[in-house]
Image (cartoon, helix red, strand yellow):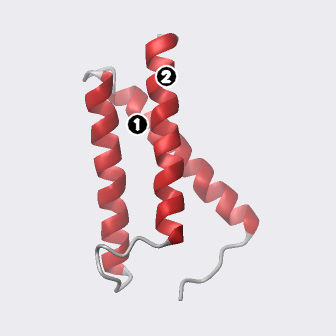
Amino acid sequence: MPQKMDIKKELRDQTLHFITGAGSTLILSLLLPVWAAALLVAAFAYGQEVVQRISSGLPWYSCGTDCMLDLIFCAVGIVAAVLIEIFLL
């Protein structure tokens, strides 16, 4: 059973997932089309979660609530970056 994080640590963790998703997408969109940057960042985020699950001794396909929350905040960051790229840059 995964250990529960306190609220400050969880807020920091999810903020960093959002910033990582948005920042990576914006930086990669300087080199690639924005759709390709978004797909690449999403694939990397999912791969990172798979590696984290395997290193914890869980099956690679077992994405629990912590994993889903991380992926959701990263995805929100990716969407924010795509919207910034489309409408502001």
Q: Which residue is at a point 34% across and 56% down the rendered structure image?
A: 46
Residue 86 in which image quadrant: top left
Amino acid type, callout 2: Leu
Q: Residue 42 at x, y = what percent?
A: 34, 45
Whether residue 49 is situated above or below residue 43 in the rendered picture: below
Mark closest to the chain's N terminus, 2 or 1: 1
Residue 15's disc is: none
Q: Which residue is mark 1?
A: 24
Q: Residue 45 at x, y = what percent?
A: 36, 52
Q: Residue 29 at x, y = what percent?
A: 33, 24
Crowd around label 1: few <14 · some 14–19 · many ≥20 (10 Å): some
Q: Which residue is at a point 25% across and 30% down the rendered structure image?
A: 36
Whether residue 88 is situated above or below residue 61 in the rendered picture: above
What secondary structure is marked by label 2? helix
Whether residue 89 is situated above or below residue 83 in the rendered picture: above
Foreground tag (2 vs 1): 2
Q: Residue 55 at x, y = what percent?
A: 33, 79
Amino acid type, callout 1: Ser
Residue 26 in which image quadrant: top left
Residue 25 in which image quadrant: top left
Q: Marks 2 and 1: CB-CB under 8 Å?
A: no
Whether residue 14 is situated above or below residue 40 in the rendered picture: below
Q: Depth check: give the residue in front, 65 or 47.
A: 65
Q: Which residue is mark 2?
A: 83
